[in-house]
Image (spheres, rainbow, N blue to C red):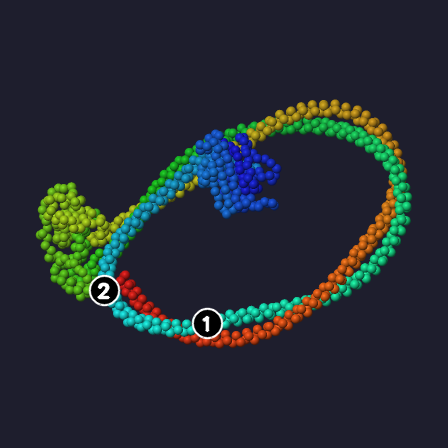
Amino acid sequence: MYISELTMHGFKSFAKKDVLHFGEGITAIVGPNGCGKTNIVDAIRWVLGEQKYSVLRSGKMEDVIFNGAKNTKPLSVCEVTLTVHNNKGKLPIEYNDIEIGRRLYRNGESEYFMNRATCRLKDIQDLFVDTGMGSDAYSVIELKMIEQILSETGDDRRRMFEEAAGINKYKHQRRSTLKNFEATRTDLNRVSDLINEIEATVKALDLQLKRFERHAKLLDTLKEKEMSLAFLQIHENKIQVQPLKLRIEELNYLRDSNVSDESVHEKKLKILQTVYKSQQDELEKFRNQLGDFNAKREGLQNDIIVWREQSRSAIIAMDRLVVEQDKINKRKDELQHHLSDYKKVIRKLKPKIDSYLNTYKQKQSSFEEIDREFKEMQTALDSMQDKRWDLQQKLSDKKSLFDLTNTIIQEKTDSISLLKERILGFEKDLESISRQIEIKKNTKTSISEKLGKNKNRLDKKTQELEGLQYKKQQIDVQEHKVSSRIESLDSKCRIYEELLMSREGYPNGAKDILENKDQYKGVLGTVGDLLKVDDSMAPAIERALGEYAKCIVVKDRKTAMNIIEIARKRNAGKILIIPLKDINDEKQNKAKLRNDDNLLGRAVDFVKTTDSIKPLSNFLLGNILLVKDLKIGIKEKSLNNWDLVDMKGAFSIRGMIINNSNGNNDSGLIGRKEKIKNIKRDIRNQKNQFQKLHKQSAKLEKSIEKMKLDIVLLDNQANDLSINLEEVDRNLVQEGFQKNQFTESIDFANNSIKENEQETITQLLLIETLKLDIAKQEQILKKHAKEQTNKSDDLIKFQSKRDQLHQNTQDLRIECLNLEGQRENVIFQKRTAEDSINEFSARKSEIVKEITQLKRQDKDLIKSILSAENKLSEINGRVNKKKSILSLKQETANDSYRKIEEIQAQIRSEQKNREALQEELKHCELKIADFEQRINFVNER
């Protein structure tokens, strides 16, 4: 298994999509500083699920997204994909290649992919567990992390070895399983608590059901009373509606009569509005005509002003052109005079310039010939100089080689002496290390034996501790169950005590008697309180007793009559009383019963009571049998003379089912006091058991703490021994390494001595050869230097002659250029004067044309001004006539408007009267609607 491909897009410095291909056997990435090596390692860690941004060298996880550069915008997402080639089948998957991907958005959202399908981080971690690959595995490290790994504690190194050995997977599965066991144990305890709480809630709901049935009866009575009240309310509302309907008819008649009067005024108003509109249209027409005349008048006035201004401007322009014409004539005469002077100067300069040019050409030819000879001599001298430098360089190289050879010989001699001294030191150190290794091996054997004994004792103590912890856990579970049972019994006891105090299930009269026994003399109690029944038989016995369970038992008939009289005076309510002395139990069916699996026995036999109350139980239950299944009991003909009741509460009188229970325990009237006593007795027993369990738990806790201290002591001893053993192992490894180093160093030193001796002999032979070559090279260099000095002196003399000739030639050239510059300047001035004369002639003809055009324009403007003034006087007359007609028509329109306002005032007055009638009509209709709504509300209710 190996990484075959890594794709990065937007991760750190990889803005564009980059793909790296790896072959099998590649284990490292190298390159210069800043090229992105560490970013590639970070990408591998990140795609494998690294969650610590500090490991990725970032301040937060979003910093791994490319943040932009000088010419590149930042990205909003980064993605890394890692392809692993599963050629050895280490990964538990059937594919040869698996692709792992991770994507991170700048808003913090993250996605994981496996073969381009969305997956969880846990899926990726489970896939690579115990393979050596992972975000924190040992197989992906940076250069700086090697020192951290070597300096970490033993536990961290152990985790790395366990990862390499492949046991981390099983440790992870063990931790996960133990965590699931603990969660399941907690859930089971919670379920037990919920069951106890729900049982108490169910019993409370049974009581609420009884209250609901009583509420339903009262609700039916309330419904009948509300229907009677609704009938009376409907009748009263109908009586109040009748006069309102009559008033609405009167108001409708008055409203219709007002509408007819209003229509007459509206017709008059429409006629006047039509006339007024036509008058306004005519006025608007006259205003528009008057506006047109005013606009024409203003236009003519503006034109006259503009034309007069244009005429004045034309006169000023003609005066300006005449002045400009005079200036042009004067300037033209001046330029004609200068032009003749320029021609004379040009004729004088030409022969002088030709003479200087001929002399310069002769000097230049001589200089070029001398310069060519000078360059040839200079080239020959440079060649000799290069040859001399080559000879000097060769001589210098040979001298350097000679000095270097002497230095090497001296170094080799010193090195041989030093190596011999070091060999003696290495041999002494090697002997010392060998003795220390032998001592360390003996120490390691002793520590290993002590560590084995300590581990055996520690394992034994650990097993004993687990046994004690298991016992304590079992006792804690029992203690928790007993505590829950006590709470449940307390809740149940409180419910029964509340039922006993509130007399729930008894009629109001019976409640009054039981709550005021001091006013009702001779009361023995209720049937339910006097009879005692087991909880298993209570539903059947209570169903058999029926309403008799709510009866009050008194001494005799006289006492019963007194109680009834007192209850009537107190308005106590319904009462059922049984006088004990007057009970006749001779009617009890005393027939023998045959053996039957379905037959449980007489109901009276399952009731516990005192001898004085025995007649009461015989009277109420003497003719009732308890059976397992009522359907089977009814079919038995021998039981036709008996009343039957089964354990579910189904009841039959003489073979006919008259009551079938739904399985609930009704109100539990039988043996409430006895149940409370039994519950309190159970609570005391449970508390005693709880105290015993608590003492056992405390005793075990002390034993466990003592055992833990022993284990900690043994564990500390084992850790100390392990540390000592590791220290000895580390020292053995280091000393073994040192021993090998000393042996290798001795061998290396002997080989180096042989090599240095051979090298010294070779260098001595080289020195003799170099001495002869250096002497020969020095003689050749002296001869060449003398020849070069002679050539250099000749070149200096010839150069001074060449420089003097070159200076004379340049002086002639400068003088010639000055004369040519003077001539060019005069020619330019002559050309400029000729161009100016031509321009003045052209401008003079243009001025004549402009003056003629301005005179013609001035005449046309004067004619236009006279014509416009005549039209203006005519338009002023028309405007005055239109204004007088417009004022007359405006007065007529104002009269029509006043008449319209008078009629509108009459219409508004009539509308106010009609609105008052409408408001009263609306008020009456709202009242009728309110009464009808009340009637409908009562009907719906």
Pick the front one: 756 or 422 = 756
Name the element at disc 1. Answer: helix
Dot 1 crowding, Cα within 10 Å, few <14, some 14–19, many 20+: some
Indicate which disc, 2 or 1, sits on the residue closer to the N terminus.
2
Looking at the picture, how far across and down is residue 397, in whole percent?
76, 29
Up-down: is 512 above or below 590?
below
Q: Amino acid at mark 1?
A: Gln
| Quadrant into which the C terminus falls | bottom left
Image side of residue 179 versus residue 801, left or right = left
Query: Which image quarter: residue 377?
Result: top right
Dot 2 crowding, Cα within 10 Å, few <14, some 14–19, many 20+: few
Up-down: is 512 above or below 18?
below
Looking at the picture, how far across and down is residue 467, in whole percent?
36, 38
Looking at the picture, how far across and down is residue 454, in whole percent?
44, 34
Marks 2,1: beta carbons within 8 A = no
Q: Which mark is residue 228?
A: 2
Name the element at disc 2. Answer: helix
The answer to whether residue 915 shows anywhere in this view is: yes
Question: Mark 1 — residue?
Answer: 273
Q: Amino acid at mark 2?
A: Ser
Pick the front one: 105 or 406 = 105
Image side of residue 165 versus residue 590, left or right = right
Which residue is depicted at the point 79% across and 63% down? 322
Mark 2 vs mark 1: give the one in front: 1
